[in-house]
Amino acid sequence: MKASDPLIVLASHFALLSLFAIGGANAAIPEMYRIAVQLEGWLTDQQFSDLFAIAQVTPGPNVIITTLIGYQVAGITGALVATAAMVGPTCIATYFITKVWDRFRDAPLRIAIQLGLVPVSIGLLAASAWIMALTTDSTWIAAGITVVSASVGYFSRLNPLWVFAIAAIMGAIGLI
Amino acid sequence: MHDTPHDPTQTKRPDLPLLELFLGFAKISVTGFGMILPWARRLIVEDKKWLTADEFNETYSLAQFLPGPNVVNMSVVFGSRMRGPAGAAVALLGLIGPPALIATALSALYAIYGDVDVLRRILTGIAAAAIGLMIAVIVKMAEPLLRKLLAPAPLVLIATFLTVGVARWPLVSTLLVLAPASIALAFWWQRR
């Protein structure tokens, strides 16, 4: 099938992606990057990195990055279609799986599914961080900000908004 | 595994008004910057007392295992347990609606001002910091797995990272191989 309507392309990409985003929207970033930058050419490297930053400072779930990508592709309709495609299928699946899940709480296969998917989801998050670091950290200062905020995030319980504020100021005064 | 003495299906509360459910999740979404989970827990367990701490962990562990955005899944699991399909829809709308509006407004601004140099540099700074915070979370999540060097989990983690992150293989076909393989390994490892 060769669909050229960007809305249909958006919807089919994100609907499929939502079912494979094990570990949340951030785990799906490698695939979003592959689709939006490499496959469809909707965004440049820089734009993808910018949208990632906007998604981080927007309150709410990280899935909002799909709203931002959708808007860049096809305006407000694109934003709505991409968001609905990313949350729709998985929410319907969740609704039904919840009922089955409770019945098989102690089944060995259910436990194996849960144990088996945990390392996959963490591996996907690591892949996301790797790809975003390659896209964003093009200067030594930007790479330094990543390293420092990783240490702050690991060793302290500082509110992330402070880390974002300091990094934004460093950008604003031209250090990056 | 989260062993809870509660049967989670018993948490159904037909008396919980749908409007309160919507406003609760809307509040979680607009106050939750970055990691939304701590805010969800604060409202559901501490403020509203809709769930006990154990029930919350159990609900979240189910949402986490499912594909798709975790907290979004959790709103569906929680809403449907409280008030059935209507509850699921209302909780989901509360969680997604307000941030989607904010994000759309920000996108419109970005479409106009995206080329302004200062804004670009500010966003680059924020993205660089966000990646750092993400790395911190990943390390914390991976630690308990990496301690067990002989178990299959660390190998699966590294294989996923290398195939999807470094080699940039397409997600869907890669996971169709990796996920069942990992589940089979976990099953075998438990049986051993």
Image (tube, coloured by chain):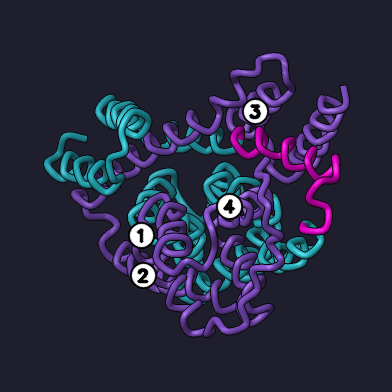
Chain colours: A cyan, B purple
Secondary structure type for disc 3: helix
- Asked whether the beta carbons under mark 1 and mark 2 sit within 8 Å of each other, the answer is yes
Identify the mark at residue B54; answer none if there is no mark: 4
Q: Residue furthest left?
A: A173
Q: What residue type is labelled 4?
A: Asp
Horizontal and vertical percent position of residue B83: 63, 79
Q: In the figure, residue B162 lies in which quadrant?
A: top right
* Segment tinted magenta in the rendering: A102-123
Secondary structure type for disc 4: helix
Q: Is residue A107 left or right of residue A97?
A: right
Please give the chain letter of the residue carrying mark 1. A
Which residue is at the front of the view, A50 or A155?
A155
* Quarter in which the C terminus of chain A is drawn: top left
Q: Are marks 4 and 3 on the same chain?
A: yes
Horizontal and vertical percent position of residue B57: 58, 51
- Marks 2 and 4: which is nearer the front? 4
Q: What whole-number distance in Å separates the C-alpha atoms at marks 4 and 1?
A: 30 Å
Residue corresponding to mark 1? A58
Q: Do labels 4 and 1 share a chain?
A: no
Q: What whole-number distance in Å separates the C-alpha atoms at marks 2 and 4?
A: 33 Å
Secondary structure type for disc 2: helix
Q: What whole-number distance in Å separates the C-alpha atoms at marks 1 and 3?
A: 29 Å
Of labels 4 and 3, earlier in sequence is 4
Residue corresponding to mark 2? B102
- Marks 4 and 3: which is nearer the front? 4
